């Protein structure tokens, strides 16, 4: 049920206004059609109440060929100036949303768009919406005095005035160290955020309670894993999904192992051991994950840059011992599915999985697949 | 356009970027209206610089172009780190510093690790990172070499081996395919040559650092020499000096050439008495080993046991 009343919004800590995104990265839905948007450039996460007009009943199916071209045409730019940065489905309305970067460099515009049943696109206006924001905080940010000073362009708001011998310049201090959010999910009342630092190589998973409490109030979890019984390392988490009624998390690292850990680990303490359950092989980056149920059993899909789509079952993951010897293919039994070029995925109403697929010609299609077919 | 007497409803109007098939695609988002005898279109987003559009009204098409702004390439690479002649086999990360804000989306094609001599690019060296890792001003790019190929025991390390080869010199090349924030190419290609030495797999031990401690009452620099190149970015924030009361001394900190040293010049003369150097133990070397832990810790080696503390303090005094 989308937020209709001001009281309802206040309950989530939202206020009416216009969030000014500097970038739009991964997106995910929370309760009551509240969309979380990661703005890595501003080191912020927004919670925005989406006032979608039309909840859909029954099963939807959505297939849009050459979505990249449709986006380019709608946004009025050449096709390679559009970058899809995130995809999320509103469980309340089955609305399909994308976060998109229009253009690059100084002129890049971040946008949230909805994809309608007929493939048409609609910009989600962020003017005068109910929203809240929080910072992506990371100790020791407060002790980090390093900043880069930049002169703002005439059309950029903000900054501090500096008198340079009669000319007033608007300056802004920008931090050298940043965190780029790679994935987010709302799990058990908490927004779980995976990100990569542009300096240290860590595996910090941030947990931000929602409603947001003040500027930034997150706890961090370092996830280690052990390679083959002998080497313990950590790594930034690239993508993850909660499964088993939010009791477990399956995550993929930038260095390819797929690990599982329990929600209990997320809630207790600041370190956790992930159990490696599979490896993806050389020069292969995991791209997306989604879970779905069929015939009373739960399955997880993992898309990756080099191979086909992998399907693992919850049962096999639970039974999987931590990997101790290097071999390929490794770990929990997996099934390769024939879907090609799969990137981001999302569950649409539980009976359909949406997939963004890159074609050999370089286009991006959006397709629906029934869970029965997977 | 002028001379429009028709209703908006009878009008077929479409604006599409050139190269896209107008027949099956939506028109550019915006507002169309008739203003007297003029048909106006206000796009929701600005026309892209340097792009051509096909405008089709009632079946007739004309082309418009927004010219690219007159600009000459101005951005350059000002530094590449590690700033060392030799890097270890398990080098983890490099930084490219630019003189001006850059565009995202060009790192994969415009930064290459190449075999020295033949110049041939080494495939699969860098981790495919989307989005790219930039500082807030988009002037410093961080690239990680594929950690799956570096970490011992992982299948990619066994199948494909390290991205680098010990004894195989390389050249990091940043090409003019890179675009700055205004779409202009990099003014000139930049390169940095490296010898490749043995892998480094040990925690950074501040006890091995060599100190040159200045005299009290002067503003001479304090210098530290490390046993290996350390991460240039993290050196900028992981070391600081406090006095006996715990107050940080203000001054200029710089990383010495080769990324193997740190120099601190105080703004005010060094006091007499006890001072402390504080080390944030997350400080890493160029292979990802930190003061607190080894990048890929060997569980059977007690020398790899991690440090439990976040901050280490080392006392000294200027005499």
Image (cartoon, coloured by chain):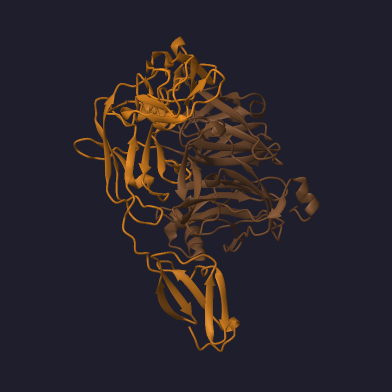
Chain colours: A brown, B orange
Residue at 36% over, 46% down: B99
Decide: is A280 above or below B309: below
Task: Give the number of marks.
Answer: 0
Residue at 74% over, 45% down: A12
Residues A6 and B165: in front is: A6
Decide: is B200 above or below A102: above
Residues A207 and B12: in front is: A207
Q: Quadrant of the C terminus of chain A?
A: top right
The furthest residue to the front: B217
Residue B123 location (% of width, % of height)? 31, 39
Q: Is residue B187 visible?
A: yes
Q: Tell whether A190 sits left or right of B17.
A: right
Residue A150 location (% of width, % of height)? 46, 48
Q: Is residue A340 visible?
A: no
Residue B74 location (% of width, % of height)? 32, 53
Decide: is B318 above or below A41: above
Residues A80 and B137: in front is: B137
Q: Tell whether A339 sits left or right of B232.
A: right
The furthest residue to the top: B302
Q: Tell whether A205 sits left or right of A106.
A: right
The furthest residue to the left: B117
Residues B258 and B180: in front is: B258
Residue B285: quadrant of the picture: top left
Residue B225 location (% of width, % of height)? 35, 20
Residue at 49% over, 47% down: A342
Residue B267: quadrant of the picture: top left
The furthest residue to the right: A7
């Amino acid at each position: 049920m989308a937020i209709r009343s001001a009281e309802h919004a206040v309950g989530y800590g939202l206020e009416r206004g216009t969030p000014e995104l500097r970038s739009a990265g991964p997106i995910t839905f929370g309760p009551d059609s509240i969309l979380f948007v990661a703005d890595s450039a501003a080191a912020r996460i927004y919670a925005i109440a989406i006032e979608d007009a039309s909840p859909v009943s029954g099963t939807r199916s959505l297939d849009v060929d050459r979505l990249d071209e449709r986006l380019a045409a709608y946004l009025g730019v050449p096709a390679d100036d559009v970058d899809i940065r995130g995809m999320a489905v509103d469980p309340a309305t089955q609305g399909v949303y994308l976060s998109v970067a229009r253009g690059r460099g100084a002129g890049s515009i971040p946008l949230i768009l909805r994809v309608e049943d007929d493939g048409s696109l609609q910009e989600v206006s962020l003017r005068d919406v109910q929203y809240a924001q929080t910072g992506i905080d990371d100790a020791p940010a407060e002790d980090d005095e390093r900043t880069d000073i930049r002169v703002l362009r005439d059309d950029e708001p903000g900054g501090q005035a500096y008198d340079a011998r009669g000319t007033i310049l608007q300056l802004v201090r920008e931090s050298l160290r940043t965190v780029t959010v790679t994935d987010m999910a709302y799990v058990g009342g908490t927004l779980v955020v995976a990100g990569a630092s542009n300096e240290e190589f860590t595996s910090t998973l941030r947990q931000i309670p929602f409603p947001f409490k003040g500027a930034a109030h997150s706890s961090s979890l370092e996830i280690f894993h052990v390679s083959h019984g002998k080497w313990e390392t950590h790594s930034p988490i690239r993508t993850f999904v909660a499964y088993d009624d939010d009791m477990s998390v399956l995550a993929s690292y930038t260095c390819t192992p797929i690990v599982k850990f329990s929600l209990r680990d997320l809630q207790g303490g600041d370190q956790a051991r992930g159990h490696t359950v599979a490896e993806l092989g050389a020069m292969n980056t995991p791209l997306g994950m989604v879970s779905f149920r069929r015939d009373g059993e739960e399955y997880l899909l993992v898309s990756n840059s080099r191979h086909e789509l992998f399907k693992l079952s919850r049962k096999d993951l639970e039974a999987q011992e931590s990997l101790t010897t290097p071999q390929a293919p490794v770990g929990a039994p997996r099934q390769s599915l024939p879907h090609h070029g799969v990137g981001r995925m999302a569950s649409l109403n539980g009976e359909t999985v949406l997939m963004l697929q890159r074609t050999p010609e370089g286009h991006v299609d959006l397709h629906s697949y029934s869970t029965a077919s997977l | 356009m002028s001379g429009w007497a028709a209703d908006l409803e009878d009008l077929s109007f479409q604006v599409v970027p050139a190269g896209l098939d107008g027949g099956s695609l939506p028109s550019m988002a915006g507002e169309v209206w008739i203003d007297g005898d003029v048909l106006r279109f206000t796009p929701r987003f600005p026309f892209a610089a340097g792009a051509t559009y096909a405008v089709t009204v009632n079946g007739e098409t004309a082309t418009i172009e927004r010219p690219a702004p007159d600009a000459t390439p101005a951005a350059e690479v000002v530094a590449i780190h590690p700033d060392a002649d030799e890097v270890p086999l398990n080098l983890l990360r490099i930084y490219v510093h630019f003189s001006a804000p850059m565009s995202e989306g060009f790192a994969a094609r415009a930064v290459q690790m190449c075999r020295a001599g033949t110049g041939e690019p080494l495939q699969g060296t860098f981790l495919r990172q989307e989005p790219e890792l930039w500082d807030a001003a988009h002037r410093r790019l961080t690239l990680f070499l594929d950690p799956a190929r570096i970490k011992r025991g992982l299948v990619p390390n066994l199948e494909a081996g390290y991205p680098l080869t010990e004894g195989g010199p390389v050249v990091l090349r940043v090409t003019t395919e890179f675009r700055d924030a205004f779409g202009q190419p990099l003014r000139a290609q930049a390169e940095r040559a490296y010898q490749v030495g043995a892998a480094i797999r040990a925690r950074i031990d501040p006890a091995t650092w060599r100190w040159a401690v200045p005299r009290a009452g002067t503003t001479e620099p304090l210098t530290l020499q490390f046993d290996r190149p350390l991460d240039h970015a993290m050196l900028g924030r992981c070391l600081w000096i406090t006095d006996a009361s715990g107050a940080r001394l203000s001054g200029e900190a710089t990383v010495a050439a080769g990324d193997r040293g740190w120099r601190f010049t105080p703004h005010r003369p060094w006091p007499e008495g006890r001072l402390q150097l504080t080390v944030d133990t997350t400080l890493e070397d160029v292979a990802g080993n930190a003061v607190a832990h080894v990048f890929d810790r060997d569980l059977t080696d007690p020398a790899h046991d991690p440090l439990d503390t976040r901050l280490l303090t080392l006392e000294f005094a200027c005499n």
